[in-house]
Amino acid sequence: MPVLSNIKVKLLGVVKLNLYIRVVCLLCVSFMAAHVLAQDLSGWSDKTVCRLVESNGGEVYIKEASSRGLECKASTKTSKAKPTKPKSNSDETIISKSPVDTKKTNKLTSYEIMKTIPYFKIGTELTGSEGGKRTDYRTITVGDFNNDGKKEILALVNSIKYDDYLWKNNNFSRGKAYHQKGTKLSADKSWNSYFVSFIHPGPSISESFNNQSLIEWNIKVVGEKGCVHPSQVLPAYLNEDDLTDFVIVCTGYDGHPFSGEHSLIMLSNGPNNYTIDNLTKSKGYYHDGSTADFNNDGFMDIMLADTVSNRLKVYINNGKGKFTKKNKYFPQYSSIRTFTTEIFDINDDGYFDVFLGGHEDGGGGGMPTKILFGNKDNKFSTKEMKFVPNVKGYENVLDVIRIKDHLFIVRTASRPNFYEGAVIQQVSTKTMKTVSVHKNETMDWIRRIFKLKSDEKGVHYGSLSYHTKMLDFSFEDNEVRLLYKIDEGQILEGLNKKAAAGSTIFSEDFEIEGKLAIRVDERNNKWYVKQDDNGNSIYCNKATDDWTHFKFGSADWSNYSISYRMKFLAGKGGQTETHIRKADGSDYRATIGSDGEVEIAFKRETHDHLASGFVSTKTGEWLDIQLTASDDNIKYLLDGEVVASAKDNRAKKGSVFFAVTANAEVCIDDIVVNKI
């Protein structure tokens, strides 16, 4: 009996232990489910939800699939079959990967992180930094990088040494010897770009001209590797934890001989801690990149586009953030020149495809935009390829996003109006034909396109920055609806009506209340709106040691007049230039100094004096100025009186450019352009 009692006690202990284990397991499952349920799945596509149902069959995903009316296969952890295509059209395409057994949801590609999850827009001034520098909009990326439930912003800023040497005083147009020297100088670490990181304030952000501040997201980056000219920041999951890592795609000094530099990898090492090192073993002019699982092992690999060697390079991940370059995925004996890449499933066959864009007009090699279609081995060939139609005059391709059965391609102007204005081209994935083209000739070019959260119910698409929001759109019932009005002279292609003589084709009074955006293009944050003594809103520059300027108008403007009010601030001298018919490196420019001297000149490679005059000016007082170009008649008027005039027909058409000399402060208001 004592032995039996002892056995009973032991059995009871085993039962209790088993019960405790079950309770703990249930609590763990409950906690994991609660964590997943806490996630916002509204930004995830039908295809992603189905893929998660198929890979692990989690209850939350099954419920989500059921609520959407999707018919997804049950969990097939060891199946090699392609994922089932959902019946309903998804709002965005998610690329397919091998159905590895994972309960993590961190196997998203860089495209899925950046393009399928909606984010609130970012104000332009929120990503500024000391010295008036701002982040390169192309490097801005957003997400919950440390899993704290908040969104963070990460971006890179070029060093002042690099930017000044390359861009100041039109240095970019200098000869090869100058840029060869710059390439050598850029080897100094002081030329490297640097990170800026913030907590995204969410929907409280409004227009870029509102003064707002961000809470810094404090990160620690260990490692001395740097990048002179970053071209892209890709968020990705590259090591064994569930925190976001980053790929820093770098070109190197952006001038002859374009010798390139290493691209970098920044791996998470606990929340808000990163280790940075070279990804590449050889330098290259890496202009863009993407992530995908090329060898179907469940880990994200990296593809880089080297624009100088004309190769797509794939780096295979061992799952721990260690990469080995493999050449078997793309042809090695043919040229693949591209400046823009993206990886996602375009034709809904379950395999990812590669979008390749660039300079179609010949300025960057004349390579048409194309799609390489994938297969089960992820080995790509030009035999399985389709070309994307170009858009005349806008043959510089910058980015792409898929919405349902359409691609939306971001473009900007090609030569001779390089990087002027912006275009959104809609292309059917079924026919590969252009459905619509939406353009704005006067806005700054859009770097990248995102899925955006709306302050109201629903989502829309467009630029992450308010600075380049004028082509933001919604896509409902297969119809594009622009969110902001494009004024006459800049309306949709195919609907553009010629303005009648005497009609106003552009106006800006800088009164920002109730207004969508200021319509002049000022890229360097050197101009700002302020209140004049009478409460009127005016546009003023900040005095710097270099010219400050802005531009507006269309490259197609020919016969027109521009009028505006302007004043030199009290105690400040200086000079202003107004350029008209500015296109293809030439223009007419009218100069007025605070001393009253006026000059009209034609500028191409040299400065050709045409006419001059003199007026009475006084700092702090407004001048009413008008400049006209009608056929070969160029006139400069003050208070309605002609001060200087000339006859010249070398510049036929072009936009407007306004500039102020170094260390001078000027305010301008009430810009009106009328067709003559």
Image (tube, helix red, strand yellow):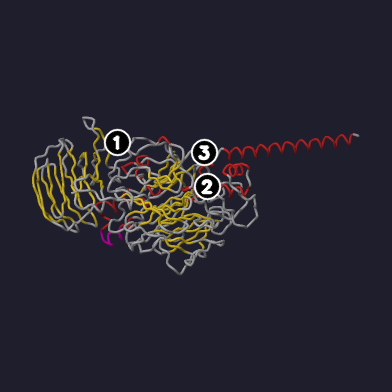
Quick one: label 1 or label 3, which is nearer the N terminus? 3
Q: CA distance from mark 1 to mark 2?
A: 37 Å
Q: Is residue 145 left or right of residue 562?
A: right
| Residue 377 position by quadrant | bottom right
Disc sitting over residue 148 in the figure: 3
Q: Residue at x 31, y 54 (%)?
A: 419
Q: How many marks?
A: 3
Q: Is residue 228 visible?
A: no
Percent x, y for residue 507? Answer: 24, 42
Residue 535 versus residue 140: which sits nearer the camera? 535
What residue did someone put label 2 on?
Answer: 45
Marks 2, 3: nearer the viewer: 2
Under mark 1, the amino acid is Ile
Q: Write the start and end of the magenta stretch as one range.
A: 174-181
Percent x, y for residue 258? Answer: 35, 61
| Residue 603 position by quadrant | bottom left
Circles 1 and 2, Cβ within 8 Å, touching? The answer is no
